[in-house]
Image: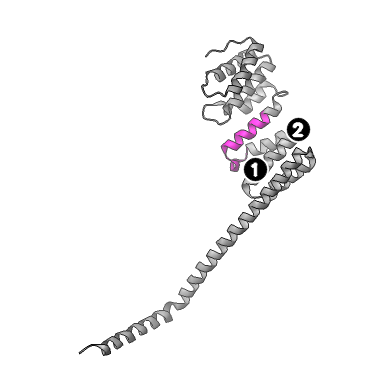
Amino acid sequence: MSDPIFAEIDEEIRRERLKQLWDRYGAHAIAVALVIVLGMGGWRGYQWWEARQAAEAGAAFEAATTLVEQDKHAEAEAAFAKIAADAPFGYRILARFGEAASLGQRDPQAAVKIYDMIAIDSSAGPVLQDLANVRAGMLLADTEPYDSLRARLEPLTSADRAFRHTARELLAFAAWRGNNSEAAKQWIEMIVADAETPASTRNRIDMLTALTGTHAKG
């Protein structure tokens, strides 16, 4: 005989087992499902919020940059400061650079203070920290004593640093301005010997060499 009766018995057994499982774990299953659904909804909500924050920060940064172009520096600096305080991380760092760049046109010492804050902020990362030191060095190159500028920039001159060419050039200029011909020659020779030195830097160093009477090797 066929086994419809046995099949029906098997079905009843399966239903009973499912009922037992549901009675035992059903509430937990619902809780897990809710956690998954709410988690996905929360993550998507966070992504939407984050995208909105970035878009707002981008628009604010563009507006602040426009103020700089219009020579409205005080307004631009206030706008950059607000972005630096409230925006997502990437825009905060950019805004601090923007504020310092604007300040540098009318208050170099205040700008240097902002660059110095970036330079010691490990969250900015080594490349941006180096850039902050170089930008500060550019503002100080006409006034800062050579030894002081050297303490700031010499660590940036090694072969593995992103802004080594600019740091070396600034130190060569500072040494020349301070009548330190030996130091000027040291930096000029390092610049000339580096095959990766940009052509524009070489051209300026050629002019400095003519002024110092230094004959660089290489």
Q: Give the number of the disc on residue 64.
A: none
Dot 1 alpha-carbon crowd within 10 angstroms: few under 14, some 14 to 19, many 20 or more: many
Asked if the residue under mark 1 is in contact with the one under mark 2, i.e. CB atoms within 8 Å, the reply is: no
Give neighbour class at mark 2: few <14, some 14-19, many 20+ (Cα, 10 Å).
Answer: few
Q: Residue at x 64, y 11 (%)?
A: 210
Q: Is residue 136 magenta?
A: yes
User: Label 2 sits on what residue type?
Assistant: Gln
Look at mark 2 in the image and give the residue it sits on: 105
Q: Residue placed at 60% from the left, 59% from the top?
A: 48
Scheme by which the image is coloured = one colour
x%, y% of residue 111? 72, 35
Furthest residue toward left: 1
**Image position of 79 with respect to 71: above or below:** below
The residue beneath circle 1 is 93
Query: Which residue sits at x=63%, y=24%?
Result: 150
Tell me which segment is drawn in magenta.
120-137
**Horizontal side of residue 136 vs 216, given as left or right:** right
Percent x, y of residue 201? 60, 22
The residue closer to the viewer here, 46 or 28, is: 46
Q: Is residue 102 magenta?
A: no
Residue 164 pos. (x, y %)? 57, 27
